[in-house]
Image (cartoon, rainbow, N blue to C red):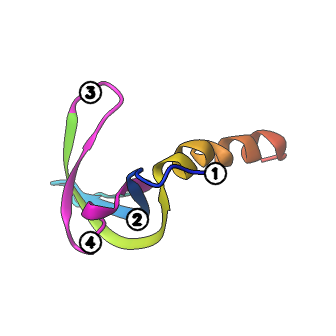
Amino acid sequence: MYMENSMNYTQCLLVKENKDGEVFKTVCWIPSEFAQRYRVLKLKEDNGEWNDGWMVEHSYTTHNEEFVRFHERDFTRQREASDI
């Protein structure tokens, strides 16, 4: 059972183009309040620095924080169990 007062997160496709025209894409869970198409965001890197200029291209499903945290590494476990 999940807590009722937890924050909601939405899975989004984010896109960023650098000054050389290279396009980068990532799929991540972001707080639902920021999951608005064409909104430009800053993402916090693993080293604590902020990476600016990511645009929300698409938003998908929304779940509460506990669900997202519990399932955040499902893709890793699936890849480890496959032959890929």
Residue count near mark 3 (Cα–Cα under 10 Å), binned few <14, some 14–19, many ≥20: few
Above or below, 25 relative to 84: below
Horizontal placement of 68 versus 79: left or right?
A: left
The reply to whether the C-beta atoms of the residues labelled 3 and 1 are less than 8 Å apart is no
Tag of residue 13? 2
In the figure, residue 10 lies in which quadrant?
Answer: bottom left
Horizontal placement of 67 versus 33: left or right?
A: right
Above or below, 7 relative to 60: above
Residue, disc 4: 36
Q: Earlier in the sequence, mark 4 or mark 1?
A: 1
Q: Earlier in the sequence, mark 3 or mark 2?
A: 2
Amino acid type, residue under disc 3 in the picture: Gly
Residue, disc 1: 1
Amino acid type, residue under disc 1 in the picture: Met
Horizontal placement of 72 versus 38: left or right?
A: right
Q: Which residues are magenta?
A: 26-49
Q: Secondary structure at mark 4?
A: loop
Residue, disc 3: 48
Front tag of 2 and 1: 1
Amino acid type, residue under disc 2 in the picture: Leu
